[in-house]
Amino acid sequence: MSNRTLTLMMGFVAFLILAVGVVFVIAVVGGGGDDNSSGQPSSSDSTPKPKSTTGGICGGNTLVTFGGEPATLLDPIQVRDEATSEYVVEVFGGLVTLDLDLKVVPDLAESWKVSDDGKTYTFKLRDNGVFHNGKRVTAQDFKYSLERAADPANNSPTVTLYLGDIVGLKDRYNNKAKDVSGVKVIDDRTLEISINQPADYFISELTYPVGFVVDKETVEKDQRNWTRHPNGTGPFKLTEYKPAEVIRLKRNDRYHLGAAKLDEVDFELGGGSLLTRYENDELHVGAVPAIELEAVKGGKSKLSAEYKPQPRMAVSYLAFNLRQAPFDDLKVRQALAMTIDRDNINNVLLYGTQRVADGILPPEMPGYSEKISSYKYDPVKAKQLLQDSKYGGKLPRIVLTYAGAGGDAPEILQAIQAGWKDTLGIDVVLQASEFSAYLRELRKGTFQMFDAGWAADYPDPEDFIDKLFYSDSPQNEQGYKSDEVDNLLRQARTERDRNKRYQLYQQAEQKILDDAVIIPDFWPIEHLLVKPCVKNWPQVSMTVPKYRYLEIDNSKGK
Amino acid sequence: MALAPTAEYFPTEDFAAPKRWAFAKRLFRKKLATIAVVYLAIFYAAGILAPVVAPYDPNQQHVTVQDRRQGPSAEHFFGTDSLGRDLFSRVLYAARTTILFTVAVVLTGGIFLGLGLGLLAGYRGGWLDTAIMRTGEVLSGLPTLLLMLAISAAFRQRINDVSFWLQDNTFLGEDSRTFVKFTILVGATVPFAWIGTSRIVRSQVLAIRESSYITAAEMMGANTWRVLTRHVLPGVLPVFMVGLSGGMAGIAGAEVGLSYLGLGIDPPAASFGSLINDAGFVRTFQQYPHLLLASATPVVLFFYAWNLLGDALVDILEPRTTRR
Amino acid sequence: MGPGLLGYTIRRLLWAIPVIFAISIIVFYMMRLAPGDPVDTILGQRYDEERAAKLRAKYGYDQPIIEQYFTYMNNLFHGDLGVSTRHQDYSVKEVVLPKMWVSTQIGLFALLITFGLGIPVGIYAALARGTFLDPLIISSWLFLDAIPVFVLIPLCQWFFALKLGIVDLGYDGIYSTHMIMPIMILGLPGVAGVARFMRASVIGVLGEDYIRTARAKGLKERTVVISHISRNALLPMITIIGLSLPGITGGAIFLETLFGIPGIGQESLSAVLAPDFDVVLALVLFGSVLFVLANIVIDLAYAVIDPRIRLGAGRG
């Protein structure tokens, strides 16, 4: 080969190395601001992130926390999961909302009246309610939003679940009507909603995002992409969303319930070692991994003072498919339930940081009763029950499916599996299933036994007991069918006395537990760390708008 | 024809196969290589004899506060894991998994596909050569990990049916689940792995075919099989061995990586990947360093030993680069 | 470029087309073989048949696979890579490009470290042949190469961030001190391979006549090393560099996941698990095209550099 070509090539390589090196050095020395990798200008450039060099993390007025990747569009009618709700409840709002004590309180409705037969709700809208762009919120906006939710073309996954009680909504959803007859605009500030039968929990259902208000103009101007620059009514505006990287919210100064004190909230979606980053003063809110819990919770760590346990209004459980052998036999279910030593698992594997679930409804749930009880650990009785079952000692093969990528099953399941084997001599196979496949097979009822959980959508026992165990409910994956429970649930739906309703749910709950349809294991607690300079961090067991209450105390320094 | 880039590593002209004993002598003259061979011998012995050597049942849990995550002691050489299982026994069984996997891949992907197709492509040439090399190119162009994920997702539901059937109808019994997983894992790794070996073998075959003794043998009417086994194969084997020993760490590493992601071997079989995953987060390491050190060290040394051995073999088989 | 070379290039490019089609069909079919689809994930526990049917119609999953494939290919030729069902219907381009750019930059810097260190180390080892330094250097780098990255990362994070407290762990853009450790971890293990290759290459050149001539002429050893040995030994290195390039756009799954870097490796893992059909397909196709092209370019580069190599003249 010629010398010239070679020299050229060497020169090129050398140039490449030099160029890259120079760029890197300049960029690092020059303050490292240029990470705008998407190549598009973003509106957040003017509000730089708090740098540890400028007075510590408590210096600015931007809260940096971590969040989950939204599972659906940031469109209220598409929301179905907690991660997405977290952002949507901050950006949008509805007639009513939940406060930090999970009470239903006015949002854009200033007040409301319920008719004597309990079937008509009349909402009076506040006159200072505006969208982020300054436009006033009127009753017409609500009618538009609710009808948009019900429009079959929009395919909302939650509208029939939460708003199905509204007169005419299901007709609209099934394309039998052109509008929702139960939603009437009386005047600009008055909205009337009628429901099919009196339902005490209806007002709670309106706190779910599917009932939130959206601006017709914004939506129709850009049907496809309007959720990237949503025009909501919530305490914060969405300024930036980079998938799997960051969601930035900025304060809405004109928020009708009192503007937030923070300038901005950044949710980092990337993951990484949250605790280390928290300790490095990169985050205001961190999470404690299980391995550190013992030290943090026991006061042995310097982080103990910043530990904020956050009980969730949720329950995790193992469920039986009653349609499949051997779980058509109550005794087999009872035997398996009595062989799980939940207290020991909690103490050893979870460092005693979770709450063993004695029932289905978590303690935060209205209508929770301490009297409810599930089967206690009793290996001797379990062995006897298994012998007495119609299968005797000879069980068919049992597979327990959980959602996951595979490999070693979660430790809790492994421990439960070992317990069954040691005590009852049953070999249960643990089977991982990709999330999408898990959901599909769950619906089809092919699983014999599965690991599952349920988190509250709104604080009402109906959300747990009726949705999961009513024989015709689509979420009744256990195939449970009990006339007694069905009757109790039907009564509860129309019962207008709140305490009586709760009692009906409690009766149903106890019957379900006695039937060993599911084995509740824990009412989960999220283990958070919050910097001392973040003031007013609330303990709230559901996803509610909470960031507007927070403050960063600059005087505390680090 | 495409020039195999990997073949550059092994300039062909000077590739003379040394005599067997001289070869072994030269290998053992290298101290590091000797240590590597000894370590590998121990690793393989320990893995194969795991059921005999292991002091405890690797899956026997002791879920109590005292028994979990113990440090190393005379009772538990490597301590215990979060479920109170004996880590030393688990490591031995993980070594068994590594050994089984590498042997399976070497037999199928290395010898059968890699060597076989390489010989075929190089010796036959023509459209066969093109077809084999292009197929290899298609397969090696695929992102392996993404495909592994897709394959294991697609077959996961079926694994149960097959393994239960095997358990009931064959001699495999309890091992059938592991057997099925192994089959899938090997089946999903091998198609993407043979092309490298084939390329090396092929270019070596091409070089050998040029030499006069092959032409002579062909002219004398020796049949293809005879020419291949008597003349071509001995010339190819050293290169093949070097390639293989250099690639062993990569093959074993594939299983460890997949198991780390939860896509490899399922329990009850143990794997270094899942052991490391259990122990390998910075916070866990800070509190219980023995968990990561005990599960990672044996397999790191295994990779290292194969790397050293591969390096030594290159030196021995390629006179020009031999250290004086 | 001679006519032979041009013909060869065209032939190779033509060959690349069926190769890439084959890959696209395999992957397309494979993704749809799995029991769950994106609609299951989108609807989650709120699934009902009606809604699912509508969503499937929206994304075209209700069509036969063959038809879906042709629709996809047709869109692809019009520059439409589809939408990400996992990321709120953002287009695949919007999701993938920024992440790919992040991974590519990190990969380039890592590559720079690998070759920037590997080449001199290899030359040094070759010149130190016969002393204890040669095996020591090579075997030390080989040891680093033997540690899986998911073992190396917690060790480094613990030592540098927790024990010494000299680095931060969060992702803060590429051009930040936070990235030094991840880039090192990505780049350093590869040094062993490059150094070994370089060493062999230099030793090969050392035996050539013109080196002996140069030495005999009494040229300074440094001049000999720099101007003759390195230059000739570097040549084969181009292949290795070329072959490494397509890989870096694929990102580093373990590194990105453990450091929380929003790169393409992390995305591809989640995309397959979700599943997010269009994103996975785009990644696979992009990777394959790049791989095939790189192969062609390398072969061509050889032909240009070394005329002794006969292109396209397959034997027998």
Image (spheres, coloured by chain):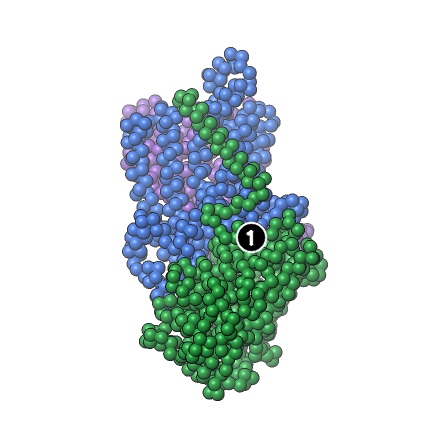
Q: In the figure, what tint was chain A given? A: green
Quadrant for the N terminus of chain C in the image = top left
Viewer-nearest residue: A204 or C13: A204
Which residue corresponds to mark 1?
Answer: A47
Q: Is residue A536 visible?
A: yes
Residue in the foreground of this view, choosing between B283 and A393 = B283
Which quarter of the picture shows residue C140?
top right
Q: Position of residue B80 (x, y in %)?
A: 63, 55
Looking at the picture, how far across and down is residue A125, in whole percent? 49, 75
**Residue drawn at x 55%, y 61% as measured from the top left:** A251
**Quarter placement of the C terminus of chain C:** top left
Q: Position of residue A451 (x, y in %)?
A: 50, 66
Task: Report the chain holding disc 1.
Answer: A
Task: Using the rendered image of the protein, determine whether residue B165 is visible from the camera's viewpoint.
Answer: no
Chain C is which colour?
Answer: blue
Left or right: C90, with C221 as reference point: left
* Amino acid type at mark 1: Thr
User: Residue at image x 41%, y 24%?
Assistant: A5
Q: Colour of chain B?
A: purple
